[in-house]
Image: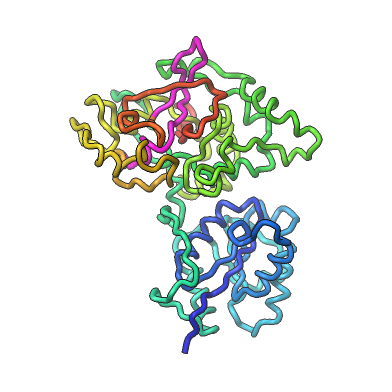
Amino acid sequence: MPGTRRLRVFLCHASQDKPAVRELYKRLTAEKWIDPWLDEENLLPGQDFDLEIYRAARDSDSIIICLSKVSVAKEGYVNKEIRRALDAADEKPEGAIYIIPLRLDDCSPSFERLKKLHYADYFTPNAHEKLIKSLRLRADTLKIETSENVVEVVAQPKSPIAKDDGLDLYRFIKIDLGSHAPVPYPYWIAKYPVTNSQYERFLNADDFAKEEYWLNFEKFDESCKPTGMWKDDGLKWLQEKLKDYTYFPRDTWKVEPKYWDHPEFGITQPDNPVVGITWFEANAYCKWLSANWKRLPESRINLGFEKYRIRLPLENEWKMAAGGDLPEGRYPWDKPGKATTDVDEIYKRANVAGKIEHTTPVNQYLEGISPFGVMDMVGNVWEWQANYFRKEHDYLGLRGGSWSFNEDGACVSLRSYYHPNYRYGNFGFRLVATLPDG
């Protein structure tokens, strides 16, 4: 009779691939018969991490080795894990599906002992389904029940984001209403605000403090017209924050968001919007994303964006993506000529004050979708805009209300503003992509 335990799956990966592996972990966790092991989820404070990782790999039923262009080009702890996994595989019966090499992008692994194994390409259609099929075969060999009715040993949280092989989180949506529209050119706006897990990639990157990411941010006036560059304002802010890092290796230089370790706002909530960052940090993230576009999940779901400009939205772009601000008091989900007034209906569609009192996952409010399919445009976080609100005071625009503002503060027409170096727990941002001459 099949056993009742779950299939133990160890996720071997490089730290640089953590965001993609975290998404994989969530999807495996959703399978009630799989018990995935990921260091940030399973290691406890005070444990000997090297010993615990060794034990977890040794005791696993299957090991998924995650590979990318970044990880195969670097030496480090992941190579040690791979060698251990290969040594353990030598002790398994011939033909057992024990090690599964998983390419996260179109990389060229150089591990000779892996070459005899068929790779799973996680960036291709139906790759996750094929991975699950391999794990089912392994479970069948070990007589582990894989039906959907198997009882979970430990309840695991499920991510609300599980569309398009996990890539929906990175999607941009085209907005184009023609040359006579308030925005007379086509542009693409991110479906969701930037999340903690997305921003973590930038935070952990070796080039976080690269000067070119913090220089020459585009400047737009109160009418959303280009008016030069910010030059070195962002770099000066960064250098002030990094002044105590001068005795550390450069690849450790970073500035964490203000609430990064907060249990309700920070990285422990990977699908919540990142908060506690300045306008400068948001712009630097845009430049980093553009420079690293080809190796990131965004490139796999938004084809042909390599030469597009990634920046913060202008207020007219943001407003049009939300469906406009007429009639007065309308919300993104309202039909033409309508404006929601029922507070309970607003609570169903947006994270506003009076109910939750902290940020929530960016696609939790499915009924709050805009006419173009853009999510979470009001409530949750105020979103930094690219343009000035008041140039004479260096005030930058903000749109959308937040978890700390009431329902009236979430309508499309409401605006706010702050200096670019302010970091609050209700300030976040989303992205826009434009044509090179847009």
Observer able to see residue 156: yes
Residue 375 appears anywhere in the view: no
In this rendered view, identify the residue nearer to me: 171 or 42.
42
The one nearer the camera, 84 or 155, is 155
Residue 438 in percent (x, y) is at: 44, 27
Front residue (pair 216, 249)? 249
Q: Which residues are magenta?
A: 371-399
Residue farthest along the bottom direction in this orientation = 1
Locate residue 108: give its quadrant.
Answer: bottom right
Residue at 50% in and 31% down:
311
Q: Locate residue 212 relative to residue 325 in the image: left or right.
A: right
Residue 211 in magenta stretch:
no
Q: How is the image coloured?
A: rainbow
Residue drawn at x 48%, y 30% is 312
Rendered location of residue 35, percent (x, y): 53, 69
Q: Residue furthest top?
A: 392
In this view, which residue lies farthest toward the left? 337
Counting the numbered discs, the total is 0
Looking at the image, the residue that sits furthest to the right is: 247
394, above or below 322, in the image: above
The residue at the point 58 percent across, 41 percent down is 260
In the depicted structure, whether residue 183 falls above or below residue 297: above
Image position of 43 (left or right of 373): right
Does 159 appear above or below 64? above
Does residue 303 appear left or right of residue 243 in this picture?
left
Task: Find residue 90 and report its image quarter.
Answer: bottom right
- Residue 379 image offset from top left, x and y in percent: 37, 36
Q: Residue at x 58, y 19 (%)?
A: 230
Task: Give the x, y percent position of residue 378.
Answer: 36, 35
